[in-house]
Amino acid sequence: MRLKTLVVVVALALLCLSAPMVNAQNLLTNGGFESGSFSGWTTSGNFEDTEVVSGSFFVYTGAEEGTWYAVMGPVGSDGTLSQSFSDTAGGQYVFSFYFAADGDNPSDFSASWDGSPVLSLTNPNTGGVWTLESFMETGTGHDTISFSFRDDPAFMALDNVSVSPVSTGTTPEPSSFLLLGSGVLALGGVVRRKLSR
């Protein structure tokens, strides 16, 4: 019986240690385009047929989260959307966004961190469904993310762009402590019942 008790204690400890860390704040301004505009972003290049929309648009049924999202459809040459932000030099950051496209030809999409491509797609196709793209990057103290895009026949879409610091702490969320505490109490009850027999 002591072996079973030890297994339960170890399982509870591992569960608490693997609990998710508290989510960090997005360093970007208007990353989900919820202002209904490109405020906080720098736009350049061919920006025709590129806008922030809500609800259904083309093959997209709506935002991945919230109300607004960006649709991009410049013809003949690329448009660019970028944002600079301050961070901690040497710190680790998750650069992520949701992207959707339906394989139009010709079209292209790329994402960069400080001018270095992290993703480059030609005639991308997610079936019109939102797809999460996520990359681990190292901060320099002041960094810039950028997107370059072109979609001659139609549109591609972008939503929930985020740059968040990777949590380096080892403190689990309060819910993990609650789970551990209830597990220890339950284990104590089982042990007490076994010893009283």
Image: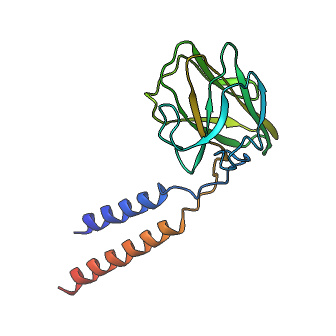
In depth, the one of 130 and 70 nearer the eye is 70
| Residue shown at the point (67%, 42%) measured from the top left | 93
What count of labels does the image hold? 0
Residue 170, percent from left and from top: 59, 58
| Residue shown at the point (51%, 55%) measured from the top left | 20
Q: Picture quarter containing residue 90?
A: top right
In depth, the one of 181 and 117 nearer the eye is 117
> Would you say 149 lies left or right of 188 here?
right
Q: Picture quarter containing residue 9?
A: bottom left
Residue 145, percent from left and from top: 72, 33
Quarter of the figure that contains the N terminus: bottom left
Residue 12, percent from left and from top: 38, 63
| Residue shown at the point (53%, 69%) measured from the top left | 174
Q: In this rendering, does residue 22 appear at all?
A: yes
Instruction: Kindly give the residue lying farthest to the left in the view shown.
Output: 197
Quarter of the figure that contains the C terminus: bottom left
Relative vertical location of residue 141 with respect to residue 187 in this rendering, above or below? above
In depth, the one of 41 and 50 nearer the eye is 50
Q: In this rendering, does residue 140 appear at all?
A: no
Residue 187, percent from left and from top: 32, 74
